[in-house]
Image: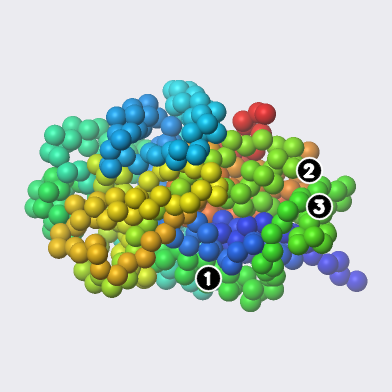
Amino acid sequence: MTQAAPTVAVVGAGVVGICTALELLQAGYRVTLYDRDEPAKQTSFGNLAYIAAEYSTPLATPENILSALKLTFSDKAAFKVTPDHWIRFIPWAMRFLNAARAPRMAHSQSGLLKINAHAVAAWKDLLKVANASDQLVQSGFLKFWEQATDLPATHRFKVMMAELGQPSELVRNEAVFELEPTLSPQISHGLYFPSGYQLRNTFTTCQKLFACFLAQGGQFQQQDVTTIQPEEQGVMIQVGGSPARFDKLVVCAGAWSKVLLKELGLFVPLAAERGYHLTFPTITDRPRHILESADRHVVLTSLDCGLRIGGFGEYANLNSAPVTRRYTQLSQHLTAILRDINPTQKHETWMGIRPTLPDSLPVIDLHPQHPQIGFAFGHHHLGVTQAAISAKWIVERLQGVNSALKPDLPDTTPYSVTRFGS
């Protein structure tokens, strides 16, 4: 008699959870995906769809901290803290400052380089499984500056990126507008990274992956998982007041993971970092490339659903209301960046919550006492970038438990769940 495949619950149906669920299915598990919302309707719904493998520098750097302090009261500031969150934010901010020390910053950068190096290949592999390879587009990435006086800093950034394995081309004056005709005449110069990738629309991509998951036998329950209890031979969860038992479980609940880990005896300093976007579905003259303003700290992408501008790193309580002023600020940035744009035309607004850890590295690990429980969360601005490779690595870790057949398990030490202590 054939033994039934092991069962796995995945908590969280964002892009990381959906990728993980599909990878588990491919590995031969029977998988149930849980979320209190519809799949990909939280942070994964409205992000910028940029596979930002170029970004292997942690958020916690002396330069970023100094810039945040200088721009605290400026509309160009990316960093914000809502008034109701300042007291809770202080302990996290102290960890963030500590992460900006040279040795810790180098450790974080090494971890980001390692995971980002596999990001595009992992996406190609997973999209192929779902017959959705067309969702990944090599559109190129242009980071630009408005002031010619920033050229020395741009050259330094270019050298640094080349040392990290990300070559770029400096474009100035008319070359900027030949490359990207939609840009405002006030743009001085930019760095063009031809290897930049994006998804056509993260939400659409997630829908295709989710459809593949269901078609291959995966199960979805739109219910909230309130309790996770390890058992000797598996794990028991409470769903809607009823228990359900599985052989294994993976937490991919984004910013909501912190509460679940606390019940499991683990502490993670996970912040709710909010981002905002405007999407213009009817604009036809859109940028050809992924665009980032070095001055305004916003990113623009052309998606199947329209032109999208997004930005801000706003720290707040999980349930705090959106700050509507952010939408006005994004509108002002859009007018300054693109020529002949009317920001009052039909558009959609959105706010999402990134799960951010002080060292800018995600958690990709197994529970130290209960290795039948895995974790994949905390990807901050790089959730889309790292979703597919995180899914691959956590599944390989789960498969490798008590197995002599997996000598080549990925080294996920930099992404340890216990690295923050208590």
Identified at 11% across, 53% down, the residue is 185
Relative to residue 124, is residue 156 drawn left or right? left
Q: Are marks 2 and 1 in contact (CB under 8 Å)?
A: no
Q: Where in the figure is residue 168, as x and y percent of width and height?
A: 26, 46
- Mark 2 neighbour class, 10 Å CA radius: few under 14, some 14 to 19, many 20 or more: some
Residue beneath label 3, please?
A: 235
Q: Secondary structure at mark 2?
A: loop
Relative to residue 155, is residue 106 drawn left or right? right
**Residue found farthest to the bottom:** 215
Kind of residue indicated by mark 2: His
Residue beneath label 1, please?
A: 207
Q: Quadrant of the C terminus?
A: top right
Instruction: Say if residue 86 shows up in the picture.
Output: yes
Q: Where in the figure is residue 79, as x and y percent of width and height?
A: 38, 39
Q: Does label 1 or label 3 sit earlier along the sequence?
A: 1
Q: Does label 2 or label 3 sit earlier along the sequence?
A: 3
Identified at 52% across, 31% down, the residue is 87
Q: Where in the figure is residue 152, as x and y percent of width and height?
A: 18, 32
- Which mark, by number, is residue 410? none
Q: Secondary structure at mark 1?
A: helix
Instruction: Say if residue 56 shows up in the picture.
Output: no
Answer above or below: position of 136 versus 106: below
Colour scheme = rainbow
Relative to residue 419, is residue 188 drawn left or right? left
Kind of residue indicated by mark 3: Val
Kind of residue indicated by mark 1: Gln
Name the one closer to the observer, 280 or 44. 280
